[in-house]
Image (cartoon, helix red, strand yellow):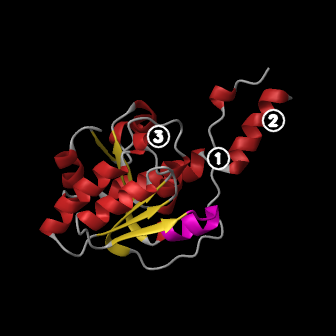
Amino acid sequence: NVDACNIPNAIELSGVVKKKRKIKSIIYVGRLVPWKQVDKVLEAFKYLLEKDKRWSLTIAGDGSEKNRLEQIVKSGKLQNVTFAGSLSKQQVLNLMAEHEYLILFSSYEGMSHTLLDAMGLGLKIVASDILANRTVVRDGAYGKLVSPNKINDLSNAFTNDYDSQMIDNAKAYVLKKHNWDKHVDLLLKQIL
């Protein structure tokens, strides 16, 4: 009788190519579907660009919203937005490691491995304040949480000071609690 609730998900970050982080860079990783609210991310990004043209946004993923999102970028004449498309897990991790921020502004999430990966890689996290994200970033201890309906709050989350201790604490937490050794050890204890 395995109690899966007591076994945290594990992530694997080995093999990530470390490069210099691009300052004022944001990455979104995930499916391009309506509940991920990437259109709202683009709207908030537009406000960021109005304040500082050095900001960049990379969108990694594919899905039913891709054409619509590309049209939003084109019609809004948004600069510094790159659609990276569908990538392998290793390519995604390497790309994430080059960015300063990860954005996840979904209206619905399950357990986000993307948040765990970003925390383990030392990215600054900006996520929608929904239960699943709140649980992963420990009620805002490891990242900024923003109402999924407030575009202004989302754009401000990138410009307000970000506590570097949050990054260090998030990385330490993920590497300790969400590693494969711990995952397998707890699983074996449940089944043996």
Residue at the left extreme? 51
**Residue type pointed to by label 1:** Ala
* Residue range corresponding to the magenta coloring: 86-95
Mark 1 = which residue? 10
Mark 1 to mark 2 CA distance (whole Å): 14 Å
Using the image, tell me which numbered label, if any, was put on residue 49.
none
Q: Earlier in the sequence, mark 1 or mark 2?
A: 1
Checking the image for residue 188, the label placed there is 2
Label located before the other in sequence (1 or 3): 1
Asked if the magenta segment contains residue 77, the reply would be: no
Q: Is 19 situated above or below 40?
A: below
The secondary element bearing badge 2 is classed as helix
Secondary element under disc 1, as helix, strand or loop, is loop
Q: Viewer-proximal residue, 141 or 75?
A: 75
Numbered circle sitting on residue 136:
3
Amino acid tagged 2: Leu
Q: Quadrant of the N terminus?
A: top right
Nearer to me, 91 or 192 = 91
Dot placed on the residue nearer the N-terminal end, 3 or 2: 3
Q: Residue at x 52, y 35 (%)?
A: 110
Name the mark nearer the viewer: 1 or 2: 1
Percent position of residue 93, x then y: 56, 65
Q: Residue 24's quadrant in the figure? A: bottom left
**Residue 102 makes an appearance in the image:** no
